[in-house]
Every structure is written in C-alpha cells, then in structure tokens.
Amino acid sequence: MKRTNTAVWYEKQNRWQIKVQKDGIRKTFYSSTPGRNGQRECNAKADAWLDDGIDNPNAKISKLTAEYIENLRLTASTSHYTQYEKYVRLYINPKIGNVRISDLHEQHLQSVIDYGYSKKLAKKTLQNIQGCIKAFLKYCRKCKYTTLFPESLSIPHGAPIKEKKILQPDDLRKLFNVDTTTYRGKPAHELFINAYRFEVSTGLRPGEVIGLKWSDVANDTVFLKRSINVYSEETTGKNDNARRIFTLSEISKAVLDAQRKFQKDNGIETEWVFSDEYGECAKENRYYKRWVHYCEANGMQKITAYEMRHTFVSVVKSLPEGYLKQLVGHSKDMDTYGVYSHEFLGDSKKTAELVSDIFGKILNAV
C-alpha cells in the first residue's frame, strides 16, 4: 500500500508529522530530526507500516546480528567490520541476543548503551555503539524484519571523556627543527619526518596523510580523495565530509617541497607523497611505531599519531568555526566536490593564511 501524502513540519511541536491509514486503522508518525532528513525519516516510518508486513518476526537478535555482521564482512572495510563485530559480540548480544525481533523496543536498545556505560566505556565508544545499533536497525528495516526507528537513544550523563594529549609549543618546535631519530643507538634520519610535520600542520588524519598522492596536489591546493586504513585498504575516508579540498599554508607547502627534495635526492620514484623508502605506500602501523620512537628519541611527549590531528585543532582553535570544520572535514553543509567548491577555495585561502600566521608565531618563538 502506497501513501499519497508527505510529512509536514510543525513549528510549535518542533517535529515532522504524517498521518496515514491502512485497513481502517489510522496512525501518526513523527520525527524530531530537523531538515529534509527528518521529513524523509518520518515518511519512511509511515511507508514501513503501510508495507506488506514483517518477515521472520520470531527470529532472535543474535541470529540477525550474525547475518548483519556477515553482510558487513562482504561489503564494508575490514576496520568497519571488525569494530562493529566487537560491539555486537561484547555488548549487543550479551544484553539482547535472546530477544525476538518482534518484541524488540527502544528500551532494549538503550539497555545496551547503559550496559556499556556500566563497564566505564568512554563517551566516544558509547557513541560508536549507538551508531552500530542504528545501522543494525536500518539493516533490519531494509530486510523487513522490523519497522522500529530508535529515536531517543542517549548517552548517559557522566560518561567519561578520554583526555586527548597534544604536543606543547616546545615539542612542536622540536618537531619542525629535528630531522633525526635513533637507530641501534645512533642518530639517523627519520623517514617520515615530513609526514609528521604535514599532519600536524594540516590536521589530516594519519590514514589521509599516508593515502596522499602527488596527483592530489595542484599548485597550492590539495584534493583529498582517499585514506589508507590499518589494514592497508584504500577507503574514501571516515565520513561523507572526508573528501575535501584545502589550500596549503606556507608551512605545509614548505613541508611538501622538502619531501619532494628528499625523494629526489634518494632516488625514490613514486606516486605516493609520503612513501616508504622503497616508494611503496606506507603502512599505518609502521608509521605509528616510528612516530612513537621519534618522540622517545627526542625527549618529546608521547602522543598517538591521531593526536597530531588534535594538536593541530588545538593550535588553530581561534579560527572561525566554519573555516576549521571545512579544513578538518567536519562540515555537514559543504559539498566540497560540487557546486560550492569555488566558494570554499576562497575561504580556504584565508584559512591557509591564518594557519601560517598561528604556526609561525609558535615556531619562531624563542
């Protein structure tokens, strides 16, 4: 049965609403999500109810999560699959694995998050579990196992926030002035020194740095198109905003120039900007291990490779919020490769100038 109307936004209630009827029964569906996504969500709820019915209502959640995880294994990246498989195995199935899909309600799903909270999981991990739950329910709706739309899942107040460490100004100055690490107790050139400097001066994720190709760089502009994960798989990035364009600051431009010279002087012919010594795409695990060793060898605070990105965000936090979101790939409104690219590039040049000024003041301080 098909609906003939569409959801309407009610300003006073701050939600979308649609009324539909089937077999003499009238039902109303809602969505508090603003914008067109909320309208689509509201319509989808109505469509699911109007549809022919639910398949396999007696199936247990543990059976359906196994089916979902197998689907992820075949269609998603290894890192995505392994992360969600862990959440299902450790948190979802232990709490609701024996529940029949027809009996499943939102409090069941909330109990999974609350269970993770009782295990003192960090807020970010609980948010990831929440994302896994919603993705699983979306899969179940597609398969006509349920019409349940979880709307009110929440992270308990007081969920611990894992403290992020960043490089302080003294360590930043070391990073941009010391090219050496140690090898068998002796000073040696650090292979990925320019990659570290590029990551901390651009805010790129480690996988985005490793995945950068020379063909992605045109004059002062970088077209970010891919990321390489810990399994050496090429992906399009962490989210829909990961593919983006940004203008190089004077500092990051100088880092790329130094990397070109390093590869030329060492006879490394490669498409990868920050390749290994053989011109091959770098391995993220090796990149991280060398970074940790570089910090130890030079008496710097030990932070993760990803925390170099946090360092950048902390350094340039005075940037206008819109500039910063676009630069690090958090914007929800910018279609980087679409019709807004010229407008973005105008802002991007301003951002590059501001970044250069901020880093310059830190690196040139006595």
Image (spheres, rainbow, N blue to C red):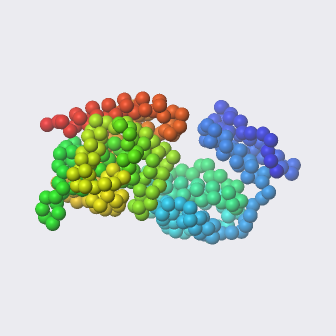
- What percent of the width, then of the height, locates residue 265? 21, 51
Please report the residue visible at 45 percent of the width from the left and 47 percent of the height from the top: 225
Please report the residue visible at 19 percent of the width from the left and 43 percent of the height from the top: 173
Vertical relation: 308 (above or below) 77: above
Q: Quadrant of the C terminus?
A: top left
| Residue furthest right in the image | 24
Q: How many marks?
A: 0
Query: In the image shown, does 313 or 215 lie closer to the viewer?
Result: 215
Query: In the image shown, does 63 or 278 lie closer to the viewer?
Result: 278
- What percent of the width, then of the height, locates residue 72? 56, 63
- What percent of the width, then of the height, locates residue 178? 17, 49
Using the rendered view, name the quadrant where residue 249 is placed.
Answer: top left
Query: In the image shown, does 181 or 263 lie closer to the viewer?
Result: 263
Asked whether, in this view, residue 302 is left or right of residue 67, the answer is left
Please report the residue visible at 13 percent of the width from the left and 64 percent of the height from the top: 185
- What percent of the width, then of the height, locates residue 272? 35, 53
Vertical relation: 276 (above or below) 63: above
Q: Confirm whether residue 362 shows in the render.
A: yes
Asked whether, in this view, residue 3 is left or right of residue 71, the answer is right
Please report the residue visible at 63 percent of the width from the left and 55 percent of the height from the top: 138
Q: Confirm whether residue 165 shows in the render.
A: no
